[in-house]
């Protein structure tokens, strides 16, 4: 397949492009950050288009329309509370996607978020109603509703892939495993964290890339698809497992931080319907 990827220099995108290339796909990567794109080993193996998708239409050869678009780009993270997501990202995403459909792309995969569900507890299935409660989740929820309601979609493949929690090389420095790795590298003796009893659904980033690759290769999969492990793990166990994996001499300092109020204590992905 000839696959167009936005957000290719991001955490998910950089790993996904590596996976797509290993599967012998032809990849077109739209990027903005020249300095960052040069850091990837795959930069010379893909077709690069420097473009701000929110300001201009990518220069795509009409004779080489991509077989699929994987849309990962989303600005303003990890600040989930900014109105930027609703006021800026949402309308510009709709405009960009409309342009991609107009030039003839008939297969689009967009990544959503488990935050679309809001403060719900327990296993979350694709068919459950959503109750987003922060600007980022609200914007993604509205984009999904618009995207999957596109008229005349009989001949289109529209895939909304909800991502749950992830970890791995290149993740934002504020993530818990990134913070833990930093503490281990600094030879710290304790790792300050919450009580650790939150239940979450975690996948390593390379597994997420593998799953996204398989989803885009399967046009029979349409609508909402969950990219998740399907079983919960406590934050405490996640941290302990990573400490053991690195054979590190550091102890979790449980209860140092209070539990976040913007997330339910226990939720994880359920198998796809």
Image (tube, helix red, strand yellow):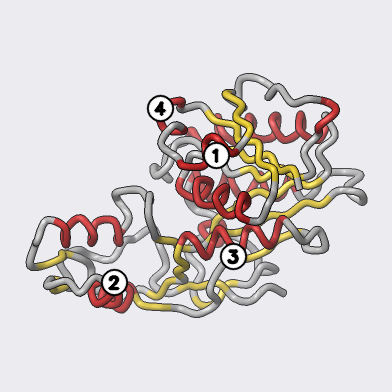
**In the rendered image, which residue does mark 1 sit on?**
7
**In the rendered image, which residue does mark 2 sit on?**
242
Does 153 sit left or right of 31 as displayed? right
Q: Mark 4 or mark 3: which is in front?
A: 4
Whole-number angstrom distance, CA of label 1 to CA of label 4: 14 Å
Identify the mark nearer the N-term, 2 or 4.
4
**In the rendered image, which residue does mark 3 sit on?**
227
How many other residues sit within 10 Å of disc 4, few (<14), some (14-19) or many (≥20)?
A: few
Identify the mark nearer the N-term, 4 or 3.
4
Residue 2, image quadrant: top right
Residue 90: image location, x then y, percent = 61, 36
Q: Is residue 72 above or below residue 237?
A: above
Whole-number angstrom distance, CA of label 2 to CA of label 3: 22 Å
Q: Mark 2 or mark 3: which is in front?
A: 2
Residue 250: image location, x then y, percent = 13, 71
Identify the mark nearer the N-term, 2 or 1.
1
Residue drawn at (59%, 23%) of the image = 51
Q: Is residue 68 above or below residue 166?
A: above
Residue drawn at (23%, 68%) of the image = 194
Whole-number angstrom distance, CA of label 2 to CA of label 1: 28 Å
**In the rendered image, which residue does mark 4 sit on?**
35
Mark 1 and mark 4 residues within 8 Å of each other at the beta carbon: no
Residue 159: image location, x then y, percent = 73, 54
Q: Mark 1 or mark 4: which is in front?
A: 4
How many other residues sit within 10 Å of disc 1, few (<14), some (14-19) or many (≥20)?
A: some
Residue drawn at (54%, 34%) of the image = 44
Does 163 sit left or right of 59 as displayed? left
Identify the mark nearer the N-term, 3 or 1.
1
Q: Is residue 195 above or below residue 173?
A: below
Whole-number angstrom distance, CA of label 4 to CA of label 3: 30 Å
């Amino acid at each position: 397949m000839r696959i167009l990827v936005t957000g290719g220099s991001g955490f998910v995108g950089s790993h996904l492009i590596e996976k797509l290339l290993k599967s012998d796909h032809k990849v077109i990567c739209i990027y903005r950050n020249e300095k960052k794109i040069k850091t990837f080993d795959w930069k010379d193996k893909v077709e690069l288009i420097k473009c701000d998708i929110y300001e201009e239409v990518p220069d795509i050869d009409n004779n080489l329309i991509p077989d699929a678009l994987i849309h990962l780009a989303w600005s303003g993270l990890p600040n989930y509370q900014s109105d930027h997501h609703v006021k800026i990202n949402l309308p510009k995403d709709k405009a960009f996607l409309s342009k991609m459909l107009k030039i003839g792309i008939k297969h689009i995969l967009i990544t959503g978020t488990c935050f679309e569900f809001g403060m719900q507890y327990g296993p979350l299935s694709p068919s459950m109603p959503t109750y987003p409660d922060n600007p980022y989740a609200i914007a993604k929820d509205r984009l999904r509703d618009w995207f999957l309601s596109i008229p005349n979609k009989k001949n289109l493949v529209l895939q909304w892939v909800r991502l749950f929690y992830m970890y791995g090389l290149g993740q934002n420095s504020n993530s818990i495993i990134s913070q833990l790795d930093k503490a281990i590298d600094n030879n710290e003796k304790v790792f300050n964290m919450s009580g650790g009893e939150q239940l979450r659904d975690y996948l390593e980033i390379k597994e997420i890339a593998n799953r996204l690759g398989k989803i885009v290769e399967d046009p029979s999969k349409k609508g909402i698809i969950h990219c998740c492990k399907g079983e919960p793990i406590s934050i405490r166990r996640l941290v302990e497992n990573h400490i053991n994996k690195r054979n590190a001499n550091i102890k979790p300092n449980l209860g140092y931080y209070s539990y976040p109020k913007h997330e339910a204590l226990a939720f994880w992905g359920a198998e796809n319907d």
